[in-house]
Amino acid sequence: MSSAKKSTERLIKKYPNRRLYDTQTSSYITLTDVKQLVLDADEFTVIDAKSSEDLTRSILLQIILEEEANGAPMFSSGVLSQIIRYYGHAMQGMMGSYLEKNVQAFTDIQNKFTTGQTGTFEGKPFSPEMWTQFMNVQGPMMQGMMNNYIDQSKNLFVQMQEQMQSQSKSIFGAAFPFPPVEKK
């Protein structure tokens, strides 16, 4: 599969037999090939060949599921349980945005380490092995920084949730009686 960037978004059709057809290369591809498109940062859309329904998210979730099943999972059962609890919750949209922004912030930090002057060691760019060595040495410090960041994010999220509750009470308080909330 070519890693050359194309100016147009790649279209992949999923057929009823569960096969994926890349219209750009006029060939059938596998989930591994789609994963490579993601790694190469190639833009693509997966659609159902019959209904033209967008299946991109479904295919990406399938790749994540396979990655989680093989090797070292990225998400603990507790984290997955917490994510599931937000589905159907009033904060679902906000949680999605929150997670997206945090992943982007983490990606930005990683990019600063791997590109430019901060991404070099003795004039050489960071290789995956050098990144591993760096993280082994810096692990405890990075863990502390991430814990502080997570605590700050959690506090901000709790404040935002309390603000929304307060605003809801002030708007709807007369029409809907709210029971008092006990502080923990």
Image (cartoon, helix red, strand yellow):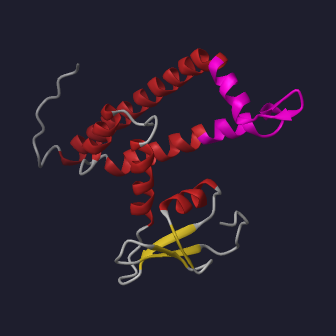
Which span of residues is magenta-colored? 107-136
Q: Quadrant of residue 6?
A: bottom right
In the displayed structure, does residue 106 sit left or right of residue 54?
right
Q: Residue furthest bottom?
A: 50
Number of numbered discs on residues = 0
* The quadrant where residue 114 appears: top right
Residue drawn at (52%, 58%) of the image: 32
> Seen in the image, is 112 located left or right of residue 66?
right
Q: Position of residue 115 (x, y in %)?
A: 77, 40
Give me the residue at 46% from left, 37% from top.
71
Of the pair 90 and 75, the residue shown nearer to us: 75
Expressed as whole percent of the image width and height from the top left, the position of residue 58 reads: 39, 62
* Residue sitting at the far right: 123
Depth check: give the residue in front, 53 or 176.
Answer: 53
User: Which image quarter is the N terminus in?
Assistant: bottom right
Q: Residue at x 43, y 73 (%)?
A: 19
Is 162 situated above or below 4? Answer: above
